[in-house]
Image: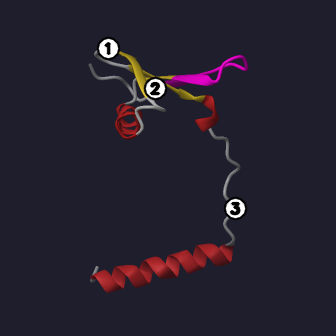
Amino acid sequence: MKFSRYEQETIVNYNAGEQTATLYTRDKAVMRKLDTLVADFPDIYKLTGQDEVSKTYSFPKSYISYRKPRAVSAEQRERARQMMIANNKAKGD
């Protein structure tokens, strides 16, 4: 079944009283990432349910992260641009 981008939702659910978070997703990219984590770290990440269109996972809620946006100065941006140009020339592009 094909879903629109809007319908490819991911929902993370947790509360203050428990140490475990639950993640429900219909997004194939998220499923691939979580399936890799389940395979690599089966004692931490668990696949708790699935059907033909979605999967549900559980993992410690301490693994959920909130980050502030990265601030990149004009100087850092220019340095990165120059490095990309140099790398492309070295590859022969």
User: Is residue 53 toward the left or the right of residue 13 in the image?
Assistant: left
> What mark, if any, has residue 71 been given in the picture?
3
Question: Is residue 69 found inside the magenta-colored segment of the image?
Answer: no
Which element is circle 3 on?
loop
Residue type at mark 2: give it: Tyr
> What mark, if any, has residue 66 been given in the picture?
none
Near mark 1 (Cα within 10 A), the count class, few <14, some 14-19 or many ≥20, is: few
Q: Which residue is mark 1?
A: 51
| Mark 2 or mark 3, earlier in chain | 2
> What mark, if any, has residue 6 been given in the picture?
2
Distance from Cα at disc 2 to Cα at disc 1: 19 Å
Locate residue 73: give its quadrant: bottom right
Q: Are marks 3 and 1 in contact (CB under 8 Å)?
A: no
Residue type at mark 3: give it: Ala
Residue 12 visible in this rendered orientation of the protein: no
Q: Give the x, y percent position of residue 50.
A: 35, 16
Q: Which residues are magenta?
A: 10-22
